[in-house]
Amino acid sequence: MERKTRIHAEDGKQDLTMTRDFELPVALLFRAYAEADIVEQWMGTKVLKLESRRHGSYQYETTDPRGNKHNFSGVIHEFVPNERIVRTFEMEGTPFGVQLEFYAFEPVTEDSSRLRMHVVYRSVAERDQILQLPFAQGINMAHNRIQDILTKLKNDTL
């Protein structure tokens, strides 16, 4: 499967960038990060809380194949509809610390958009540990689900 999400991680740096182009209008792509029902679909998780606003917060819960529950949470520091989200992200109960995420939503054409993600980790070592996981495959699959779910949503409303 082609990986359409591009990840750039410079050696010796504690951050990475991801870029993905979608065949979706920017307003529709933004909804994938702002609306609980859509987040649940593409992340395959339960949204316990999602306050899509400046100074809001979120909490997600997922269950692994063995039935174990895992929580993810964070605080939304900036929320500009159809433009950007700045938030923290924490995988609770793991050795990984809180990361800072900058999401930029850019229109390319009327019917296409680009998502740029800049993620800052606590250390170079932590970022490198994340990259050892099936991270690239997972984010690409998640972005593919966003494209599929929102394409269907767009077609159902036309």
Image: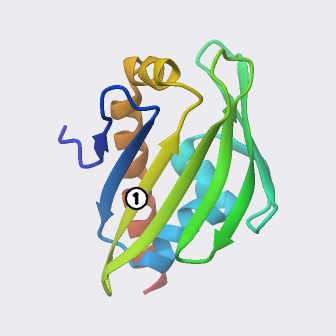
| Identity of the residue furthest to the left in this view | 2
* Residue 66 image position (x, y, % from top left): 63, 12
* Residue 103 image position (x, y, % from top left): 51, 59
* Residue 19 image position (x, y, % from top left): 33, 54
Disc 1 crowd rating (10 Å Cα; few below 14, some 14-19, many 20+) is some
> What residue is shown at x 19% (from left), y 37% (from top)?
1
**In this view of the protein, which residue sits in the foreground, 126 or 62?**
126
| Identity of the residue furthest to the front in this view | 12
In this rendering, the count of numbered labels is 1
Q: Which residue is mark 1?
A: 116
Residue 122 vs residue 150: left or right?
A: right
Q: Is residue 23 above or below residue 11?
A: below
Q: Quadrant of residue 115?
A: bottom left
Residue 59 vs residue 63: left or right?
A: right
Mark 1 element type:
strand
> What residue is shown at x 67% (from left), y 69% (from top)?
79
**Colour mapping used in the image:** rainbow
* Residue 13 image position (x, y, % from top left): 40, 32
Residue 68 vs residue 20: left or right?
A: right
**In this view of the protein, which residue sits in the foreground, 34 or 132?**
132
Of the 4 image quadrants, the one containing the C terminus is bottom left
> What residue is shown at x 29% (from left), y 41% (from top)?
8
**In this view of the protein, which residue sits in the foreground, 12 or 133?**
12
> What residue is shown at x 57% (from left), y 49% (from top)?
101
Three-letter code, disc 1: Arg
Q: Is residue 88 above or below residue 121?
A: below
